Image: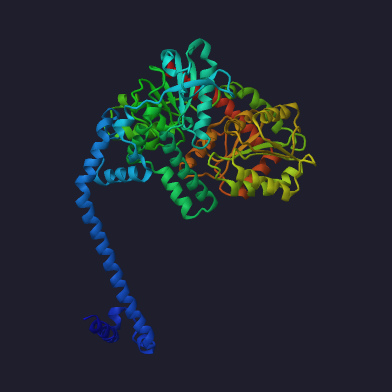
Amino acid sequence: SPRTTRRARPQRVARELEQCRRQPRARGVPQEWLEECPAGVLAAMGLLKVLFVTATTLCACFVAMVAVGVVVMKDAVQAEYAALWTPLKHLDVDGFTGGPAPFLRQLQVVATERLTGADQFPLEESLTKTQALEWVASPSVDGLRVTRAAQPGSKTLLDNVDGAKALVVGTIRMGFGHHRIAYAMSSWGAGAQKKELPGGVYFHDLLSIESPEARLIHDTDALYRKSSKLATEVGGPFELLHGFLTSSGDATSLRSTALVGARLAPLMRGLPKKAPVVATHTLVALAAAAAGAERILNLVIDNHPQWFVVAPGALNLVQGPRNYYGFLQKFEAGGVEPAEADKRVALAGHWIPKAMVEGIEKDCDRRIRRAKLPATKAPRRVLVPVGGAGAQKKFITELFVEAAPLCRSGHVQLVLNAGDHADMKAALLEVAASLGFTEKSGDLAIVHDHAGVVALGETFAKGDKAGAKVTILAFTDYFAAVAATDVLVPSIDVLACKPSELAFYPVPKLMIRRVGDHEAFSASRANELGDGTAEVRTVPDAVLYLKRFVASAEPLATMNAMIKRHDAWGAYSGCKNALQLARA
C-alpha cells in the first residue's frame, strides 16, 4: 500500500548507505568522509539519488511516448505532406534541392505550416484566386508606377498593359534591405523605360496590397523584427538562436518558404501577362513561379548560400563569387549537371542604384581629396543608418556617446539615420541632449523628410566643413527612411553600417556589429574587395577606426581607389546586368 511504501523508503535508503560504507572504493567515496558525514546529509544524498532515478525514468517514458506518437502519426504526416505538394508539382522543389525530404523533415514542414498559420490558406484556392491590380504614378520616383489593389471603375488595370514591353520589380517591405534593392533595380528600369520599356516599370510591393495574403506576410515580418531586437539588445542565447536561424537555411527551409510563397500567388496573377518579374525577395520569386510567370529573375541577398534565398523556376542572380560557387556546389551535389546548374544561378554584381553607379568616379575623387586634407578642414562625414527592424539601438547610442569628443573637436561630422523608428529617434535625441548638442547652438540638426535629406546633401556639397557637427534623420514616411541613405552616400566619407545589403555599396564602409550570423559573410565580401573594414563587434573598436580615418588619409584613400578599380570591371553593375537579362 502507499503507507507501507512510505515506511519502507527510509529503510531502503539506510540499506543503500550501509552498502556504500562497506564498498567505498567502488562508489568512489572515501570511508573517512562517510564516517564523519552527518546522517542528515547522507539521507539527503540518498533522496537525491531517488529523485534522479525517478526523473530519468520519466524522461525515458516521455521520449518513448513521443516516439510512439511519431510512429502512429507517420502515415498521417506523410499523407498531409504529399497533399501539400500535389498542386505544386511544377515547382519540383525536390529536384531543385537534390532529393525528397525524409520523414522528420516532412514533419518539420507540416509543423511549420501550423505554426505560421499558412495552413489557413488552402493551396488549391491560392493557385486559382486572382487579386485585380491597378497602378498609380509613384509620388517619389519619376517614371515609376506603383501597384495596388484595383479600385472599382479603375482605368489603369494591369490586365490592360502589354507585358512584353513592361517590367515588374516585385518586393516585400520586410526591413529596408529588400525595398532598397527594389528601388535600385527600379532606377535602372525607369532610366531605360522610354526606349526599352514603353509599357512601364511597376513597383510591386506585396505587403502594400490590402489582402489576407499581405497579413500573412506582416505576421512573419513581426516575428523577425522581435527576434532581431532580442538578439541585439539582450544578446547572449537570443543572439545565438537568431544567428543560427538566419544562417542555417537548409532544403527544408526552402520547402516551407515555397509553401508560403504559393499562398501569395493571388497577388502575382493580376500582373501583366508575359512581363518579366525581377524579385528582390525569395517569397516574391516563389509566388511568381507558383502563379505561372514565364520569366523570373531572383536577386539573391547576402553573401551566404542558403537554400531559402533561391527559387526554383527562376534565374537566381547573385552578387559575388562566394554565393555563386556555393550554389553551384549545392546543385551539383544534388546530381544536377553543370550545364543545368548554370541555368539556375548566375553571377551579376552588386545591387546598386543607377545614379550612384554613374557617379562613382567623381564621388571617389572628391572623397580622396577630402581624406588628404586635415580633419579640422574637412571633418570626416560618417553616416550611421539603422536597419529596417530597428534592432541596433544599444550599439548606435553607445557609439554616439563615444564618438562625441571627435564631433565636438570638429574632426567628425556624425549623421545618424533613425529611419522611421520612433523609439530610435527618442533615444538619439535623449543622448544628444545629455551630450550638450542642441539645435540652438548649431551643433545639432534634425531632418524629418525627404526634401530635407536632399537639402542636406546639397549643403555638404557647398563646402568641406558645411553642416552641423551632429545630424539626426528621423521620418514618419517609409520611403524617406529607405531613400535617405542612398541620397547621402555620394556626399559622405564613411558609411558605418551593419553588414546588410549596404555592405555591397560603393562607398568606404565601417562594418559594425551584425544582426544575424548570415551577415558576417557580407562584411567579409567588403573587406576582401578592400572597400570596407572587417566587422567591428565593439564600440571601442569602431571608435578606433574613426580615429584612424581622422589621423591618416591612407585608409579612406585606399578604399576609394579600390572602389574605382572594381567599378571598372563591373562589380557594382548587378542591376544593370539584371535588366539586360530580363529583356533578353
Q: Is residue 436 left or right of residue 173?
A: right
Q: Position of residue 391 (x, y in %)?
A: 54, 45
Residue at left 24%, top 41%?
Answer: 80
Residue 509 screen position, x and y as percent: 59, 36
| Structure colour scheme | rainbow
- Residue at the right extreme, as displayed: 441
Q: Residue furthest front?
A: 152
Q: Position of residue 203 (x, y in %)?
A: 49, 24
Q: In terms of image quadrants, where is residue 191?
A: top right
Is residue 428 toward the left or the right of residue 408 in the image? Answer: left
Q: How many marks?
A: 0
Which of 152/522 is in front?
Answer: 152
In the picture, which quadrant includes the C terminus? Answer: top left
Tell whether 9 sits left or right of 157. left
Q: Nearer the viewer, residue 189 or 148?
A: 148
Q: Quadrant of residue 140?
A: top right
Residue ranking furthest to the top = 195
Q: Is residue 351 visible?
A: no
Look at the picture and state if 490 lies above or below 426.
above
Q: Which residue lies at the image location 31% right of the left edge and 46% below the top edge?
A: 111
Query: In this rendering, does residue 228 appear at all?
Result: yes
Residue 348 in percent (x, y) is at: 45, 25
Does 206 appear above or below 358? below
Residue at the (57%, 33%) spot, across then down? 478
Quarter in which the N terminus is drawn: bottom left
